[in-house]
Structures are given as C-alpha cells and as structure tokens.
Image (spheres, rainbow, N blue to C red):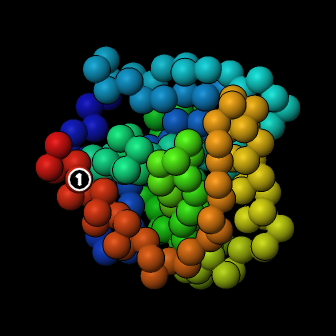
Amino acid sequence: MDLSSLLPSPSKGLVNLVVEIPAGSRNKYEYFAGAGVMALDRVLHSSVRYPFDYGFIPNTLAEDGAPLDAMVIMEEPTFAGCLIKARPIGILDMHDSGAYDGKLLCVPVADPRQKEITSINQIAQSQLEDVAEFFRTYKSLEGRVIVIDGWRDSIFVEGLLKKCIAANKDK
C-alpha cells in the first residue's frame, strides 16, 4: 500500500483519511511505510476503546513527527487501511508529553446522513468529552503527560492542514 501519490486534501474542505484503528478496538495499528502495510503497534492495556475510526492524513507531517492524526464519525467501524474522503469539522487540541498533537475530527463524505454537519458545534458536547477522556485515560495509563486544550471549530482546520502539508514537503 503505497500512499506517496495520495493527496492529503483532494479538494478544498476535504481530506483523505487512512484508517489505522476501527472504532471499538483496543488494538493500536500503525501504518508501516517501509513495508507499505498496517502493523500492530500495541494493545491498549486498559478497558478503553477507540471511540471513532482513527487514522491519519497521508503526506502530512505534524509537530510530533508523525502524519496529522484524524478521527472520523461513522455509524459502523471500517477497517485498518480503509481510505475515507472526509470533511474536517474541528480539531482536538492536545499536547502529548509536551509536543502539540492536534487531531482532526471529520465526517465521511459518503454518508448522506452527515452531509449537513460542518461544525464541531453540531456534535453533542458529551460525545466530544468522551473523545477527550479516551485520550486522557489511555495515554496517562502509558505514563505520558497529556494536556487537553479543548476543541476548535472547522475554521482552524485549513491552517493546521496547510502547515502539516508544507512540513511534509520540507522533510
């Protein structure tokens, strides 16, 4: 699975998202670019499970040295390696062990029930807090210091995405 020619953003307001971890999983998979496959990185040692399909935007480089993280709200989990064209609606601002580790929250373009969702403000606050608590819990159990700075709306996505695309080109 060679992702080198895949555009991070196929058009304005959309991203290509590669799923690494399906919703409900305790298995943490990561894309292993050297071999072009998904690899099992670790199994979460707590009872928490990924709240949404979780992955990355290919051909980006975030401040933590990895591709830009992204989650997608789905009714049913997909699978590791699934490519989803998605609309980012916000960012979970967080720092992991002192490094900025923002995560896009997206909705899939292919789901007609979510075509009207364009803002983080359209998602229940309790659902957003569940996502933040997931990251607080699983990362702190691994001994990492996590600071959740809150959620930012979709108007902030383009700036972060452009920065991560440019960083990837500069590497």
**Residue 24 as seen in the image, left or right of residue 119:** right
Figure check: 52 above or below 109? above
**Residue 2 as seen in the image, left or right of residue 111:** left
**Residue 111 as seen in the image, left or right of residue 166:** right
Residue drawn at (37%, 50%), measured in percent from left and top?
Answer: 63
Q: Is residue 111 visible?
A: no
Residue drawn at (47%, 62%), measured in percent from left and top?
Answer: 86
User: Quadrant where the C terminus lies?
Assistant: top left
User: Quadrant where the N terminus lies?
Assistant: top left
Is 159 or 149 nearer to us in this picture?
149
Q: Quadrant of residue 85?
A: bottom left
Picture coordinates of residue 133, whole percent (x, y): 77, 52
Q: Quadrant of residue 158?
A: bottom left
Is 2 or 169 nearer to us in this picture?
169
* Secondary structure of the residue carrying numbered label 1: helix
Residue drawn at (42%, 29%), measured in percent from left and top?
Answer: 31
Characterize the local packing of mark 1: few (<14), some (14-19) or many (20 or more) Cα atoms within 10 angstroms: some
Amino acid carrying mark 1 in the image? Ala
Picture coordinates of residue 79, whole percent (x, y): 57, 35
Picture coordinates of residue 154, whole percent (x, y): 50, 77
Instruction: Please tell me how many numbered marks the rendered image carries.
Output: 1
Picture coordinates of residue 107, whole percent (x, y): 56, 65
Figure check: 3 above or below 57? above
Q: Which residue is mark 1?
A: 167
Residue drawn at (44%, 76%), measured in percent from left and top?
Answer: 156
Q: Is residue 34 visible?
A: yes
Is 106 or 66 nearer to us in this picture?
66
